Image: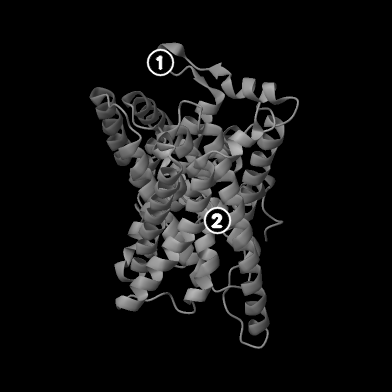
Amino acid sequence: MYDALPRRARLRRWLSRETTGGALLLAAAALALIWANSPLAASYTALSEFTIGPAALHLDLSLSTWAADGLLALFFFVVGVELKHEFVAGSLRRPREAAVPVLAAVGGMLLPAILFTAVILVTGDTEALRGWAIPTATDIAFALAVLAIFGRGLPPGLRTFLLTLAVVDDLLAILIIAIFYTATIHIVALAVALATAAVFAVVVRQRWARWWMLLPLGLVVWGFLHASGVHATIAGVLLGFAVPARPVHGESVARTDTYDDLVRPFSSGIALPVFAFFAAGVSVVGTSDPLAVVAQPVVLAIIVGLVVGKSAGVLGTTALVTRTTPLRLPDGVGMRDLLPIGLLCGIGFTVSLLITGLSFADGVHTDGARLGVLLGTLLSAAGAAVLLSRSARRARAAAADAPAAHTIDGDGPALGYDRDE
């Protein structure tokens, strides 16, 4: 069936797979690290700082800024669509079932921030406190990719738990960016952006709505939100939330599905890898004192926050909630199964790198913070992969003597819907 699809459809489906998105992210980050620490490091810096765009509109931005503010809006549009689906027709529409992963997401954001702050205060580098939110984020696409690769055969309840937790994590990260990383707000530009977003919300519900009608409206929202002082990626979330999550006008599928299928290949195949390429290029070898970058307190603070804080926050909150309230985990999922899920939540990467850029504009802590994100993500992913592999082997061995059951197979989309709902 898959081989019978047209070549373009096969490419779109391949780009939308969890494993593909994770592989492209890793490849882009690895290329950036190698280039930034090679004899050609100056060319990487020149490429990142190359400026393009209309100066009259104050959009003469560097390529790295275009990747963070522009292309990443596509990723946040997909996140917004996913959030809308989950609230209206997905796991978050049933508060009792969603309560445990939702509370786990909150705990998984509070503890990393606390540990980061504690490490920074102990080491005395108080200027680095601006980065307290860096280890609070989870890269949903990367985390689901690791689960898909190493968790084949595990119960689907684990993926649902991680997906729900990561979606709420993304929502909280969006709120953090909007509230704590907006220095000044230009009211007129913000009002125009919100008014245009309202027009988008009306048009996207019409029978005659087409993507080429919505694209100009989306660009206007992005442009005025960028001019307002609010981080421009929030435009993607606003527009994603505006898409109806239930079928309208007699259509067989919700438009969240339609636009998710349309935008996701560009998000996972272009936007995220390009952003990772420009954000992950930490130069260590080329500095006068490479150890000075590694020894920055912010590196240790982020690693502790991602590896220890995320997993301990998620597991501790889950244990507390399930033991002191009537709330329970999904069927077939126990606390032991959640240890690798806690580590998966420590894969900060995309959003953590974005917050790094927003936290440190002086360059003093930027390389150290990015290195901390990369090392923390690598350690979390490696630990989760080992634990998932062991659990999956046990699950497959047990399943060999039991009736066939639905399990994680790794072929779902990067953020994935429960299509049976």
Marks 2 and 1, how far apart in space? 37 Å
- In the rendered structure, are the residues bearing label 2 and label 1 in contact, judged by CB atoms less than 8 Å apart? no
Query: What colouring does the structure picture have?
Result: one colour
Query: Picture coordinates of residue 14 (x, y %)?
Result: 65, 51
83 w.r.t. 95: above or below: above
Residue occupying the point 60% across, 47% down: 375
Q: Residue at x 67, y 75 (%)?
A: 393
Q: Residues within 10 Å of mark 2 (few under 14, many from 20)?
A: many
**Residue type, mark 2 in image:** Ala
Element under disc 2: helix
Q: Residue 57 shows which numbered tag?
A: 1
Rendering coords of residue 185 (x, y %)? 27, 27
Secondary structure of residue under mark 1? helix
| Residue with the most extreme right position | 39
Could you tell whether 75 is left or right of 222 in the image?
right
> In the rendered view of the protein, which quadrant contains the C terminus?
bottom left
**Residue 33 shown left or right of residue 253 in the figure:** right
What percent of the width, then of the height, locates residue 103? 35, 63
